Image (cartoon, helix red, strand yellow):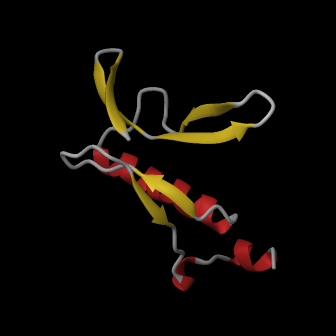
Amino acid sequence: MGEETVDDQLGYFVRETQCWWDVAGKRTIRVQYTLSPRGGFATPEEAHERYKLQRTSRARRGFVHSFAPCYQASGRCQYVRIEIPPSETTNEDQDQV
């Protein structure tokens, strides 16, 4: 998550970065997706809600390993295993079983 000025307006952005190792090319492939409207979210809270929604969506599809941003002085990311509380399951989840 981050903030940026677009068209003279401050917006808050959520971006997802995916990386994997390309064996043939012997290099890391890095792709970044923006999960925000063009001008960003109006508040950091809105951006954080979108971030949480994306993490839950990924975890429901089996992608439970994440490096979560850390906004403390160290600036380092932190590994997090995404857990989905049973109360967050939906009918859609049950239909796929």
- Front-most of 41 and 28? 28
Q: How many marks?
A: 0
Q: Is residue 47 above or below residue 12?
A: below
Q: Quadrant of the N terminus?
A: top left
Spot occupied by residue 76 in the image (x, y as percentages of width and height):
32, 46
Q: Position of residue 61 (x, y in %)?
A: 70, 64
Looking at this view, is 97 or 74 the one in front?
74
Q: Quadrant of the rendered structure where residue 24 is?
A: top right
Q: Is residue 7 left or right of residue 91?
A: left
The structure residue drawn at horizontal position 29% and vertical position 43%, both measured from the top left corner, is: 43
Looking at the picture, does residue 77 appear above or below residue 59?
Answer: above
Q: Is residue 6 above or below residue 18?
A: above
Q: Is residue 63 left or right of residue 1?
A: right
On the image, which quarter does residue 22 sit in?
top right
Direction from residue 29 to residue 52 in the image, left or right: left
Residue 4 drawn at (x, y percent): 33, 26
Which residue does the image show at 74% across and 80% down from the upper left?
94
* Residue positioned 69% across, 39% down in the render: 21
The image quadrant where one finds the C terminus is bottom right
Identify the residue shown where x is 61% and y is 65%.
Answer: 59
The residue lying furthest to the left in this view is 73
